[in-house]
Amino acid sequence: MITHGPSDGGLEKIEIALLLEGIYRRYGYDFRNYAFASIRRRIWHRIQMEGLSTVSSLQERVMHHTEAFHRLIGDLVIPVTEMFRDPDTFLALRRDVIPLLRKLPYIRIWHAGCSTGEEVHSMSILLHEEGVLDKTRIYATDINESALQKAKEGIIPLEKMKQYTKNYQAAGGMQSFSDYYDSDQGIVRLKPFLRRNIVIARHNLVTDRSFNEFHVIMCRNVMIYFNSQLRSQVHKLLYDSLAREGFLVVGGKESISFTPLAERYETRNDQHRIFRKLR
């Protein structure tokens, strides 16, 4: 694996800036304010995989061949997710948030950066067990269209079933995890009723606007790849998309503490990064 680029760091930065600008203008994906070290590493991985030697040569290929662009997107947007990921967070939602949502006549939840949908379907199971799924609409969005297609299919990797079952139990699961899927010839598919109230669509947190008002927004382990400017921009979008007294849930290594909007939230659960909008 290539772990460093050309010796001329100044030239490399120019090339990467031009590549990201080209992607934005050509395809509408904006990676210009992603954390540089992370995106640089992924770009060089793609350069190696394409059999190229410079960022500029990758730019030429990506600009002229959409297939190459989609291969690069697969590197820049790495889907990392699992059913009931960080089960203690789902347990906290079950105990601290759902009882408050139960009082609402209708519930809207947004999973921003949903990847292949495992955590979205986990939420659906949780809401079903708590008796509020029928009055909930879950919006699942991501910029990666291939990941969204997998989310729509609702297929669980067979080799991950043991871990997912363990996560479900640790998240306070009330039934057998096997009640929520069908297995046939090595393919495990979630039951259709879990997907009935889920809307899956492409949405870019960097370039798109708010599209509804939500009572809960799950945006976990997405902003760790952004620089401070982009994090502030996305936090503004999430804040504007939350209903009054709505809940924002971010990743374990993320926080609202150093954002301009920190004073507009109360910390509901600091350990699991659950915040509640005050106004």
Image (spheres, helix red, strand yellow):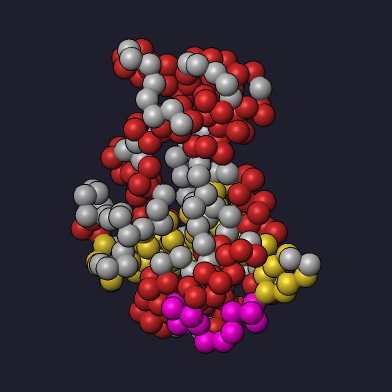
- Image coords of residue 113 (percent x, y): 49, 51
Q: Which residue shows up at 57% across the image and 86% down it?
A: 175
Above or below, 208 relative to 178:
above
Q: Which residue shows up at 33% across the image and 44% down it?
A: 231
Considering every residue shown, the one lying at the far bottom of the view is 174
Q: Taking the image as drawn, is residue 230 in sight?
A: no
Considering every residue shown, the one lying at the far right of the view is 185
Q: Which residue shows up at 72% across the image and 74% down it?
A: 182
Judged left or right of residue 89, residue 265 is left
Q: Which segment is the magenta one?
A: 169-180
Res. 186 image quadrant: bottom right
- Image coords of residue 227 (percent x, y): 32, 38
Res. 152 image quadrant: bottom right
Please check the rendered image and state whether residue 174 is part of the magenta-colored stretch, yes or no: yes
Above or below, 181 relative to 9:
below
Front position in the image: 67 or 99: 67
- Image coords of residue 137 (percent x, y): 58, 68
Res. 278 image quadrant: bottom left
- Image coords of residue 197 (percent x, y): 63, 69
